Image: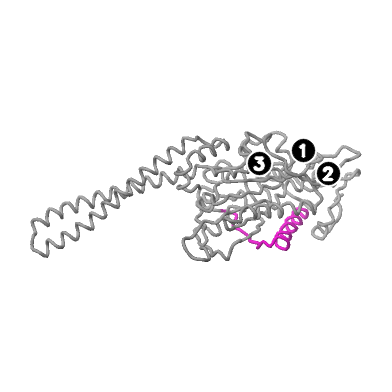
Amino acid sequence: MLDLQRIRQEPDRVRDAIRVKGMGDPQLVDRVLDLDTRHRQTQTELQEARHRLNTLARQIGQLMREGRRDEAQALIEENARLKERIKSLEAHARALGEQLETLLLELPNIPHPSVPVGRGPEDNVVLHEEGCPPTFDFTPRPHWELATRHGLIDFERGAKVTGSGFPFYVGKGARLQRALIQFFLDLAVQEGGYVEIQPPLLVNADSARGTGQLPDKEDLMYVIERDELYPIPTAEVPVTNYFRNEILEENQLPVKFCAYSPCFRREAGSYGKDVRGLNRLHQFDKVELVQFVHPDHSYEALEQLREDAERPLRLLGLPYRRVLMCTAETGFTQAKKYDLEVWSPGQQRWLEVSSISNFEDFQARRARIRFRPAQGGKPHFVHTLNGSGLALPRVVAALLEHYQQPDGSILIPEVLRPYTGFDRIG
């Protein structure tokens, strides 16, 4: 959520953010400002009416003590009318406040000045490439063929049991999955200084609103209507809401959490080659990195978080690139976002395995997460950041394709072997 004072002072900047992100109608800003003006006017009228009510109470008391009952009676009648007016003003102010809150939830975050303006993926900027895509003296197979050949992943039975996008991981496929999760968590805790946290897999609507999934991504979320709960699309949601409606002390910052969780996404509208195999699933595993930081240090923290997400890719020996997303590809809640993409030899394209984002105070305002300055004074909103460290499906896909051998077997990267207990598949 944007600071209302900022919207009043910089309405054109907010309108421009809506345009360059391609999210909504810039006229929404005018509706917000109109509602804000009416809400403040109503609040002023309410304060004046309450002040008059207090004045009347004193005057009536004075007149009654002096025995001037006839004069007091006129004020008593005015007092009764004023009480009814106050009730009406309170209801009107409450309704305007709720409407204003609803509109504020629809405004996207403002992109950081360093984010390139663009209309689509072609305007993203590749900042860095690490490692060289492997060369093969045979035609590399895509991961879905390798996974099926070695009995690692059963897509068909997953579709039978649940539907497309819900695969079974079997045997060494399951062990590889578990090994990667443990490897990612160990790196985050031991190298990155994160505290591991195991979150709930269902959240309420307040939590989903707090991180911005509602209303922006409502169509992409599963919902358990009977209980009004949402299966999480990412551990970002429960972990960020861990401090919802709380005030931290400044000396507690930064707080760094890492969390493994299954993730559930409807991915409405996905089709074609991009959904084959592990490319796009409705249920998948991910290790998430979440930080709560002082506003003065959030962009320094963003670069450190990016490094934390890149570390496992380097250790796994996977060629990857770092991409700065343009305004149209920077999400509703994000001020700045990097994507990390690994090379897929079997598909001859780049696959996103991590998004690393700074939300500034956008989520913290929605979730009311603040900190109390060490020198005292009014609490301030923290800045929140998160990144995938990493998302499992496409990492598994890249590993299978990258480490496939001429005989069809698949080598396990050396750094993973203590976790898998085997060095080769097939």
Q: Position of residue 273 (x, y in %)?
A: 72, 35
Which residue is at 23% across, 54% downward? Answer: 52
Q: Tell us which disc is closer to us: 2 or 1.
A: 2
Residues 205 and 246: in front is: 246
Q: Is residue 227 visible?
A: no
Q: Earlier in the sequence, mark 2 or mark 3?
A: 2
Q: The residue tagged with tag 3: helix, strand or loop?
A: loop
Kindly report the distance in space between the C-alpha atoms of the residues bearing marks 2 and 1.
13 Å
> First in sequence: mark 3 or mark 1?
3
Q: Position of residue 252 (x, y in %)?
A: 58, 65
Secondary structure found at label 1? strand
Q: Residues within 10 Å of mark 2 (few under 14, many from 20)?
A: few
Q: Are marks 2 and 1 in contact (CB under 8 Å)?
A: no
Asked if marks 3 and 1 touch (Cβ < 8 Å), the reply is no
Q: Nearer the viewer, residue 239 or 278?
A: 239
Residue 9 at x, y percent in the picture: 46, 44
Q: Amino acid at mark 2?
A: Cys
- Label ID, residue 132: 2
Relative vertical location of residue 202 with respect to residue 100 in this rendering, above or below: below
**Span highlighted in magenta in the image:** 174-202
On screen, residue 88 versus residue 374, left or right, reads: left
The residue wearing badge 1 is: 349
Amino acid at the residue labelled 3: Met
User: What is the distance, in whole Å, between disc 2 and disc 3 at their CAs?
Assistant: 22 Å
Q: Amino acid at mark 1?
A: Arg
Q: Mark 3 or 1, which is nearer the eye? A: 3
